[in-house]
Amino acid sequence: MADLLPLADAQKALIGAAHRLDTEIIDLDAALGRITAQNILSLRNQPAADMSAMDGYAIRYDTNITSWDITGECKAGTPACDAIQSAQAARIFTGALLPEGSDTVIIQENSVRHNSVLTHRTDTPIIRGQNIRRKGSDFSKNDIIIEAGTLINPAHIGYIAAAGYDKICVYRIAKIAIISTGDELRAAGVDCDLYQIPASNGPMIAALLNDYDIIYNDIINDNLQSIKTIISNHHHCDVIVTIGGASVGHHDLILPALEDLGADISFMKAAIKPGKPIMAGRLGRSHIIALPGNPSSAYVTALLFLLPLLRYISGLDDYLPPVRKSISTEALAQIGARAEFVRAIESGGTITALASQDSGKLSTLAAANALIIRNSESEAVKAGDDIYYIPINHL
């Protein structure tokens, strides 16, 4: 096991060799799901001035006054209405600017109006300053409203718009080439002979990378020159992902191809199961991730290495997969030197490992919604023990 890099060390080596993507300015209406490249400072106060939070009447608070003459009306979207004096009130609506001289709003449900005279229900005390949104109470000019490295969601877009922006600076979307290799592979939907299989890994990994700019290639045979050519043809990509041929067998040609092309290999194997033959490095400006060919191995290593790499270069500091806690429904054996990621089903706070963990079985992978994390040299787990997992297959 001496030649296998522990998972944390392999992830550290991967990110240590990575670089952030370039940035670009985009329209705010195209910013959903993008990652901010710089802090966003508000250009304005919100609210811009004191305004009413409710429909009602604006008054000047005075415990000695029990009725008010209504002298005006304040509507949202218009300048403030005329100033009021003591014992005067202005009809006011939600979002309207407070008239000068007022400091309190009585909501209309607690108000009694007779012609132009306002009184107040005695069972609901008036509190100075009630029902007012103060200038800058949401955010103030020059506040940092969104930090760099934030994944923009719909609420963020509203927040940024309210702060005065119609464009923002974000990291560019990563361009990724996906290359499947193997003489045994045939495109999905094509009839296969007994010695052939449909190329399932490519579509699966492409679906996992749906948020990125993907170049999906035809299947490449196990031919050194063909592999070198297809890799070289994608030198403009940020990440080149190969699937299959990453081990050390006679027909595993990814490493020889990368060595011939002058790639800088960060690591070649990781102490994990499934997914030991995972390889990563750099070729010019491109990051290289070589995934194993077994479906579960390809999926697990994509979750542990490929997605973290893409999240990091896209501007996120929180790039590792999310980890959750559940309760094991069964006993699990002690783990050896390789960390294991056990396909499982988590439901209602409990988690159950699936019976078969064969890395070639897509049925097991498709049934799973979690990967139980068994770190290297972990002690045995008893039924009822807490256990950690990575959620998967959640769209």
Image (cartoon, rainbow, N blue to C red):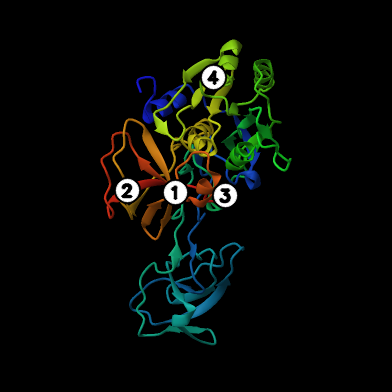
What element does badge 2 sit on? strand
For disc 4, the marked residue is 282
Q: Quadrant of residue 349?
A: bottom left
- Which residue is pictured at 50% across the width and 53% down the height? 46
First along the sequence among labels 3 and 4:
3
Residues at badges 3 and 4 in contact (C-beta under 8 Å)?
A: no
Q: CA distance from mark 2 to mark 1?
A: 12 Å
Quadrant of the snapshot with the N terminus:
top left
Q: Residue furthest bottom?
A: 114
On the image, the x and y values in percent for residue 386 come to 29, 51
- Which residue is pictured at 38% across the width and 82% down the height? 66
For disc 3, the marked residue is 157
Q: CA distance from mark 3 to mark 1?
A: 31 Å
For disc 1, the marked residue is 370
* Side (left or right) of 258 relative to 103: right
Q: Which numbered marker is on residue 387? A: 2
> Taking 281 as reference, is 335 above or below it?
below
First along the sequence among labels 2 and 4:
4
